[in-house]
Every structure is written in structure tokens, then in C-alpha cells.
Image (tube, rainbow, N blue to C red):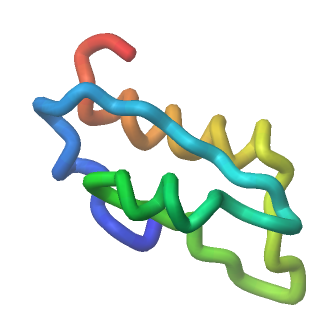
Amino acid sequence: MSKQMSLLTHKKVVLILGSEVTGVEEELLSLSDEIFSIEMYGEKRSLNVAIAFSIAAYELSKNHATL
């Protein structure tokens, strides 16, 4: 992840995932306290939303007793 998710240790969390084409609407992003992105290497520049969720949920689970 491009930003350390450990900042979220004591907060309630909502994961918002956007589509590969349009992403997340600017209005929704402006309401967010934290915005994270998954760093990509190589030629591909997008992940399936299920894979993106899995990575984010895993990172969050390392910082929360329960998810």
C-alpha cells in the first residue's frame, strides 16, 4: 500500500472500491478521511476489485483485532 494503514488502528473503517474505468467519484473522495492506493509495478495498471479488496482487508486485519 502506498500509505501506511496502521494509522487506522483505532478508527471504524469503510472500504470504498472503485471500478477500473471510472474509479471513485470525486464527491465521495472529498468526504473521506484517508485515501489509499495499491502500488502497481510492471505493465498492468489495474486490479480486479475482488483482488483489491482482498489486499486492503488483509492490510487492515493486521491492525485490527477483529474485522
Q: Position of residue 30 (x, y in %)?
A: 39, 63
Quarter of the figure that contains the C terminus: top left
Query: 27 or 56: nearer the eye?
Result: 27
Q: Residue at x 31, y 57 (%)?
A: 34
Q: Residue at x 42, y 32 (%)?
A: 14
Residue reaching furthest to the bottom: 43
Rendered image quadrant of residue 54: top right
Residue 50, relative to residue 33: is it above or below? above
Q: At 25% across and 34% down in the image, what residue appears? A: 63
In the figure, 34 relative to 46: above or below?
A: above
Residue at 43% x, 72% y: name it: 2
- Residue 36: percent from left, percent from top: 44, 62
Count of all numbered marks drawn on residues in the image: 0
Q: Quadrant of residue 62?
A: top left
Give the image location of residue 5, x and y in percent: 30, 52
Residue 55: image x %, image y %? 59, 44
Q: Farthest residue in the front direction?
A: 27
Viewed as shown, does residue 11 lie left or right of 33? left
Q: Nearer the viewer, residue 55 or 16?
A: 16
Q: Nearer the viewer, residue 67 or 62?
A: 67
**Residue furthest out toward the left:** 10
In this rendering, position of residue 13 left or right of residue 54: left
Name the residue nearer the viewer: 16 or 62: 16
